[in-house]
Image (tube, coloured by chain):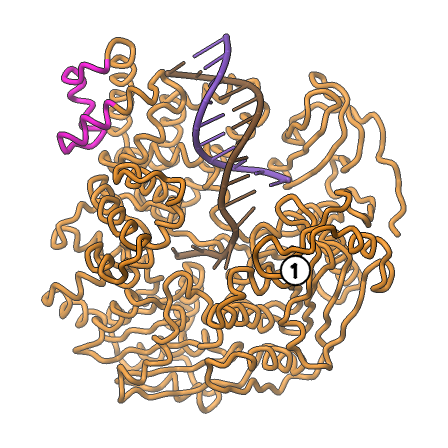
Chain colours: A orange, B brown, C purple
Amino acid sequence: MHDLTSDLTWSQQEAVTHFEGPLLILAAAGSGKTRVITRRVAWLLQQGVRPSNILAITFTNKAAKEMKNRVEALVPGNKVWISTFHSLGVRLLREYAHRLELDRNFTIYDMEDRNRLIKQAIEAAGFDNVKFTPDRIGAAISKAKNQLLTPERYAGTSADFFTQTAAKIYAIYQKKLRDANGMDFDDLLYLPAMALRLLPDLRSELDARFKFVLIDEYQDTNAAQYEIAKKLSIDHRNLCVVGDPDQSIYKWRGSDIRNILDFERDFPDAKVITLDKNYRSTPAILRAASALIEHNTQRKKKALLTDNPEGEPVRVLTFDTGLDEAEMVAKRIKEAVLAGRHTYRDVAVFVRMNALTRTLESAFVKHGVPFQIVKGLAFFERKENKDILAYLRLLVNPQDNISFLRVVNEPTRGIGKVTLDHLQNYAEQHELSLNQALDYLHRIPAIKGKAVAALKDFQKLIHDLRALTDEMPPEELIREVLDRSGYREMLKSSADDEDQDRLANIEELITAASQFTSEDGTRTVRDFLEQITLAGDIDNWDEQQQCVSIMTLHASKGLEFPVVYIIAMEQGILPGERSLHRDEDLEEERRVAFVGLTRAMKELYLCNSRLRDFRGQTLYAIPSMFIQELPPEVQTIDLGSHGGRNPTIDAYRVGVTEPSFDGSAGNHRSISAPKTSPATHQVSTSTEPDGYEVGQIVQHPQYGIGTVTSLSGHGALRKIKIRFAVGGEKTFIASKVQLKVVKKRNSSDAS
DNA sequence: TATGTAACCATTTTT
DNA sequence: TGGTTACATA
């Protein structure tokens, strides 16, 4: 049996070996929190607690998987339930479907699907969706659900017009969602929470089942999640929560920092343990992080202590433009790696928003620096993959109207909007799903001739495919869908090169499916769909790969890297534009920055640039106020081409004709100067053996002469974009396209 | 009904 | 900047 505590500090040991009763662990960044939780699970098992009586909740699927592995290593063969709140929700809803009067084959709708449905609800409610965008209404509904509010109760929260409107749409949306046998993300928390609240038998059953509950990242739980936790801890009050109020960064998603601040109020007998010793970062990094977070007024004061060696000072790097920033960060990383100071895997670049990864991507490609952008779902969110997945969903859940509408005319089958409007009307009047309504085409006089035949063909297609769903593994089913639906044919016969690309993506999807089933033969199509929808950004991150990780600050939570760059630390970006007016929001932005700083183990670079290209225009940027809040010991280095007094920049400054701030706060100022970027540095690299380079002149058999404008991806997914003299820009798969290199790129100076 | 073009618009963070 | 939508046209 493992010795689980001898290598722990006294407070860590205390946390691990606390047996029964509520426990609050306030764990500062880098204080070995994950270790404590895993050890605690193992320790409980060692005390004779049955594995099935333990429930551990993590923030991401990845964290759950890791924790499973670690617990497995300590106590082999255990069956502890470790998952995210959302996965827990799905499993409970499926397991207790009949008691909750639900159909267990429900579809989980992602944001895009949800927005489609909300759009329908907005239209059904008779509001034009110009002012009420699905996004805004969706956010309101999501918030309501996270607070466990029904449409009626939500309507009671405020008399203002928006709330009243959103409440009406919420009601309609919810009905449509149930009719389609669909769940949105919030339902996965809302329904279990409500079930626990309203069904005492079920509640006590589950309370007894999960005698010990552990929750990680507790500072980011919302009301629904807290309700679940509380309701599982009434008869067996062994609720252990771990978190750090300074790292609460999901308020916009409904998480409530009060859950952790008020834990002692809800559980007055809770034991409170503070872990404040940091094992991750250098003192320099911690001093910077502390100085920053101390500007928050709504917080308990807390020190960050470490025994680690002093290390490098924290550095602020200033560049002329966002392009420079991306290029020079790429170059610096490359140089450091070539000099043997660290490997690519040691380095991470954090951004406040996903839009900022674009520039980084091209700079990294250009300089041949291997990288991965950690944005998990991107691949499955491509249209072609979503189409195929929609077919699968429709097979699993015949009531899924959203998926029905998505694929009914994809590929085109001559079923247009008018026909579908008729079908939808009939379905609604008779309380049928669209799929069921197909049985009554003869009763819908408005649909005739060709349209009837087309719909019947579609009905048969789905019917036939459905007969196969339980008989074959997901990957084979996808092949059948692809062939029988005509989707493959559509792409194959297309003249558009991008369509060959799309076909290749679907092949990737098939590979992903077979990988999924090969891990566990019992996995079904439904499991595959569920896994994809619930996968978070970080879940597809491969930390083994020898490359730089690029991700948002939010995605970085819980991770650590020897070297960290945070880019675009500018007013309006970090802190974000929308947070500048409310202290509460500004403090959350500061926590976002704090999370970023505390990921760094040895080296930390905070970057900003004087000019930033933002949605098409060049803006004059002001360094983040958070940079001013750092201690004076932080080194500032100007990497502009003229040591801070850049005539090009000055020219821009003079060129400012409108000193107004676009009506909002004074952050990024609009510039009406030449659009060309003033200081671009080109460095020649050849990143792949194919020898293509940005700037090369090439000849395409069909399109003729063109210039390579960008290269991305690797191997079979490597793409080459070319701007042709005639016909604009086209993208090809590098390995497939037949190109003749006409002229090597002009070698230009690398200033 | 399908497709192409032009205006338009919206922009944080994600399970 | 790029993606979406509305409208006109075939």
Q: Is residue A723 above or below residue A603?
A: above
Measuring from the top left, give residue A165's x and y in whole percent: 29, 49
| Count of numbered marks | 1
Query: Which chain is disc 1 placed on?
Result: A
Measuring from the top left, give residue A199's x and y in whole percent: 11, 63
Residue A10 image-quadrant placement: bottom left
Residue A609 covered by magenta stretch: no
Residue at the extreme bottom? A10
- Given residues A649 and A393, the one toward you in this image is A649
Magenta region, residue range: A422-447
User: Which residue is at a point 53% across and 77% down the rendered structure image?
Assistant: A30
The amino acid type, in three-letter code, at marker 1 is Ala
Please state if A317 lies on the left or on the right of A645 as rendered: left
Residue at the extreme left? A201
Measuring from the top left, give residue A444's x and y in whole percent: 17, 18
Secondary structure at badge 1 equals loop
Residue A438 covered by magenta stretch: yes
Measuring from the top left, give residue A65's x and y in whole percent: 42, 61
Q: Quadrant of the N terminus of chain A?
A: bottom left
Q: What residue did someone put label 1 on?
A: A568
Residue A19 image-quadrant placement: bottom left
User: Which residue is at a point 30% across and 43% down the rendered structure image?
Assistant: A526
Callout 1 environment at 10 Å: few (<14), some (14 to 19), or many (20+)? Answer: many
Please state if A174 lies on the left or on the right of A63 as rendered: left
Q: Is residue A665 above or below residue A747?
A: below
User: Which residue is at a point 52% across and 30% down the rendered structure image?
Assistant: A502
Q: Is residue A665 above or below residue A399?
A: below
Q: Is residue A590 above or below residue A429?
A: below
Residue A433 image-quadrant placement: top left
User: Which residue is at a point 36% across and 27% down the rendered structure image?
Assistant: A481
